[in-house]
């Protein structure tokens, strides 16, 4: 079933959802952009994360793309149509990258947003990071025990 038939997404409904989140959390396009500039400024300098960002040629383009992403995710504005999983495939990210990314995201969110705003962003960041990490990094399982000849 097409969910847009069951739950019609009108511009008015989106605007009402965005206004509700802003009223409850203080999050809006302006505070999200300021947060992203602080977060990526620190990420570029970070010894674990920095090398992964060394290949970003267009930082203003990256910030604009991430602003559209977080605005869609946190404010339900619906303008982002990229493919985050694809964008990270070539970066050889490890669990240490994700742990560091989330720690920096949390520290910056707590400094930039209200408590409710930071909680709203963090809940989404953790969920998306977990699904990216599961999609990108193969599970390290212990080796299978050797099987006997007639097992
Ligand atoms: C684990 C550490 C991470 C590193 C080192 C990393 C690094 C990068 C890099 C280098 C790009 C490409 C930028 C460009 O060339 O313009 C990118 C894109 C992006 N990242 Fe991450 N990332 C990480 C985790 C995350 C997480 C957890 C999220 C979301 C919660 C995220 C969201 C995005 C998005 C939305 C894009 C843009 C995708 C597109 O539309 O092309 N990243 N990231």
Image: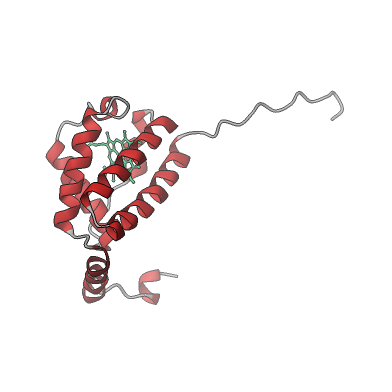
Q: Position of residue 119 (x, y in %)?
A: 34, 56
Q: Is residue 57 above or below residue 17?
A: above
Q: Nearer the viewer, residue 33 or 10?
A: 33
Q: Is residue 105 above or below residue 23?
A: above
Q: Nearer the viewer, residue 101 or 149?
A: 101
Let me know if residue 80 appears in the view: no
Q: Quadrant of the N terminus?
A: bottom left
Quadrant of picture, ligand 1: top left
Residue 48: name its quadrant. Answer: top left
Q: Position of residue 17 (x, y in %)?
A: 27, 71
The residue lying at 21 percent from left, 38 percent from top is 40
The residue lying at 23 percent from left, 69 percent from top is 23
| Residue occupying the far right of the picture | 150
Q: Nearer the viewer, residue 143 or 109?
A: 109
- The number of numbered discs placed on residues in the rendered structure image is 0
The residue lying at 21 percent from left, 53 percent from top is 68
Q: Position of residue 37 (x, y in %)?
A: 16, 42
* Relative to 108, 132 lies left or right: right
* Relative to 93, 137 lies left or right: right
The residue lying at 39 percent from left, 44 percent from top is 129
Q: Is residue 139 above or below residue 16?
A: above
Let me know if residue 89 appears in the view: yes
Q: Quadrant of the C terminus?
A: top right
* Relative to 125, 57 lies left or right: left
Q: Nearer the viewer, residue 73 or 120?
A: 120
Residue 100: name its quadrant. Answer: top left
């Amino acid at each position: 079933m097409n969910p847009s038939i069951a739950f019609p997404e009108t511009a008015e409904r989106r605007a009402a959802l965005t206004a509700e989140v802003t009223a409850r959390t203080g999050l809006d396009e302006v505070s999200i952009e300021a947060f992203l500039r602080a977060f990526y400024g620190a990420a570029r300098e970070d010894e674990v994360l920095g090398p992964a960002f060394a290949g970003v040629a267009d930082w203003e383009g990256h910030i604009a793309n991430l602003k559209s992403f977080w605005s869609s995710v946190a404010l339900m504005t619906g303008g982002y149509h990229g493919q985050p999983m694809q964008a990270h495939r070539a970066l050889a990210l490890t669990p240490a990258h994700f742990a560091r990314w989330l720690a920096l995201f949390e520290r910056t969110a707590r400094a930039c947003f209200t408590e409710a705003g930071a909680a709203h962003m963090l809940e989404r960041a953790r969920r998306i990071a977990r699904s990216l990490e599961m999609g990108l990094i193969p599970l390290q399982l212990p080796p299978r025990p050797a099987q006997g000849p007639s097992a």
